[in-house]
Amino acid sequence: MSGNDIRPIVKLRSTAGTGYTYVTRKNRRNDPDRMTMRKYDPVIRRHVDFREER
């Protein structure tokens, strides 16, 4: 079970307000804070920041 605790599944929600999400895993030891990634949002057809949702 400890493997599940170190790499939890997180949702990344678009900051553009479209409601589009990506699902990924993160390493809690390397990224203890909320994760932010710049990814493609197909709803508005451009790259925006995606922020981790809990």
Image (spheres, rainbow, N blue to C red):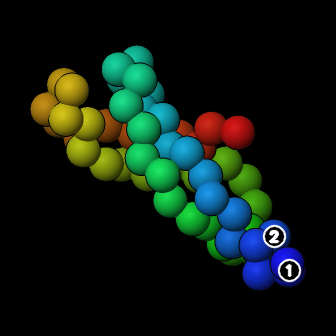
Would you say 37 lies left or right of 34 here?
left
Secondary structure under the numbered disc 2 in the rendered image = helix
Q: Quadrant of the N terminus?
A: bottom right
* Residue at 48% across, 35% down: 13
Query: Which label sits on residue 51?
Result: none
> Which x, y percent locates residue 9?
63, 59
- Give the quarter of the image for residue 45: top left
Q: How dense is the environment of label 2, judged by Cα within 10 Å: few (below 14), some, or many (20 and up)?
A: few
Q: Residue at x 69, y 71 (%)?
A: 7
Q: Label 2 vs label 1: CA separation?
A: 5 Å
Q: Position of residue 11 (x, y in %)?
A: 55, 45
Which residue is the site of mark 1?
2
- Label 1, secondary structure: give it: helix
Tell me, yes or no, if residue 31 can be seen here: no
Residue 33 placed where, x, y %?
A: 72, 53
- 46 or 19, which lies in front? 19
- The amino acid pointed to by label 1 is Ser
The x and y percentages for residue 25 are 57, 65
Residue 32 falls left or right of residue 45: right
**Residue located 21% across and 26% down the image:** 43
- Mark 2: amino acid: Asp
Q: Residue furthest top?
A: 17
Quick one: 17 or 3, which is closer to the camera? 3
4, above or below 9, in the image: below
48, above or below 43, in the image: below
Decide: marks 2, 1 in contact (CB < 8 A)?
yes
**Residue sticking out furthest to the left:** 45
Left or right for 19, reference 26 = left
Q: Quadrant of residue 49?
A: top left
Q: Viewed as shown, does residue 1 lie left or right of 4?
A: right
Q: Quadrant of the C terminus?
A: top right
Q: Residue 5, labelled with which disc?
A: 2
